[in-house]
Image (cartoon, rainbow, N blue to C red):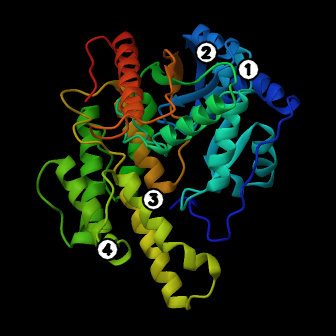
Amino acid sequence: MQQVVVAEPYRFVAPRHGTIVPRLLHLWLPRYLRKSYGIVSVSCRGTEQLRASLAAGHGVMLAPNHCRPCDPMVVGMLAREAGCLLNIMASWHLFKGSAVQAWLLPRAGVFSVYREGLDREALACATRILVEARRPLVVFPEGTVTRHNDQLNYLMEGTAFIARSAAKKRAAASQPGQVVVHPVALRYVLEGELEPAVAPVLEAIERRMAWRPQGGLPLVERVLKVGSAMLALKEIEHLGAPQEGEIGERVARLVDRLLVPLEAEWLKGRREPDAVGRVKLLRAAILPDLVTGDLPRDEVDRRWRQLEDCYFAQTLSCYPAGYFTPAPTPERVLETVERFEEDMTDAVPPLARLRVVVDVGKAIPVATERQRGGEGDPLMAQLRERLETLLVASLEEARPGARLT
């Protein structure tokens, strides 16, 4: 399990406002993306729409999809082309990494948010950034890295809350300009051949499972066989035996097996509509007493096991049903093999060369009041629709005939 939960008292980390470090990072980004993530090029489209919003004095929120860990750096390349600096909301655990990372992130304009509870300081900071309109604010509305480029997770409505709060403050202060949200679609495209990139990783996974390498199988069949075996192992662990049915059904059943008992214990059965939201509520309930350090050892161990189950359930949710039907694109196969490796080892090196297309969508003006009626937040519905439209267009361009599921 990656250390995404920190069992110590939360302290908000504010962004610094200097310009030297972020401008130096702009120069360093291409080399870093190439070396650390295999990204050989980043092309930005619709940058003029972002520039127009900045020139108008709008408070600008950038809302990208979040399919890879390098997404914030890719959005940094957009800022470099647009000639602006960014503020980025990021999970607090990232500030608890290396000393270099803890020093660098705030100076790059990044500030923390506590995902295991209500973080009023982060919300106030995000709102203030939009009201002051000095830099665009980057918020990833999916709330976590999904590892699937062709499908959006549930979008967290906190995104709309921040934007609407800022719109109210700007209106009350009679400041020029609005608050606007630009959807930003990040499309990763494989450069080169797929099989040489993923076959060594598949062979390593097969050997860990005490299999002979399955190199004689067609690649997609081989990936599905490995994935089914990995799922069956976890079903045996948690359910006692491998299950029958489609992969998507089996994944959903295992997620419920992990989370429903925890929701009964901690939330009186309350549940959110998606796995990320469910896990967020459970962490917020389980973690506080761990932070105080007053629990007996056996209870500490029990709660950490529960947090591990939450982490695994969220990981399972990143394998969307139907992602390999009718036929997967090379990028979907690559993403899936990367997830296999990350789930087994908590790390994955760059397996292939990628190019990225960054599409900036038209600005969505933010109203000061939420329209009533209908299901969900209308701003989030509009953001989702525009993100999906941009992703469909970029997929059609990259892989004609492919489609989202």
User: Badge 3 is on which residue?
Assistant: 280
The three-letter code of the residue at mark 1 reads Cys
Mark toward the start of the polypeptide (1 vs 2): 2
Question: In percent of the image, x 49 and y 36: which residue is there?
Answer: 66
Label 3 neighbour load within 10 Å: few <14, some 14-19, many 20+ = some
User: How many callouts does the rendering have?
Assistant: 4
Mark toward the start of the polypeptide (4 vs 2): 2
Q: Which mark is residue 268?
A: 4
The three-letter code of the residue at mark 4 reads Lys
**Front disc: 4 or 1:** 4
Query: Cα distance, mark 3 to mark 1?
Result: 33 Å
Mark toward the start of the polypeptide (3 vs 1): 1
Label 4 neighbour load within 10 Å: few <14, some 14-19, many 20+ = few
In the rendered structure, are the residues bearing label 1 and label 2 in contact, judged by CB atoms less than 8 Å apart?
A: yes
Query: Cα distance, mark 3 to mark 2?
Result: 32 Å
At mark 4, the secondary structure is loop
Q: Is residue 207 visible?
A: no
Mark toward the start of the polypeptide (3 vs 2): 2
Query: Residue 17: where, in percent of width, then height?
Result: 83, 36
User: Badge 2 is on which residue?
Assistant: 50
User: Badge 1 is on which residue?
Assistant: 84
The vertical placement of 62 against 374, above or below, is above
Mark toward the start of the polypeptide (4 vs 3): 4
Q: Is residue 378 visible?
A: yes
Query: Residue 200: where, in percent of width, then height?
Result: 44, 39
Query: Cα distance, mark 4 to mark 2?
Result: 45 Å
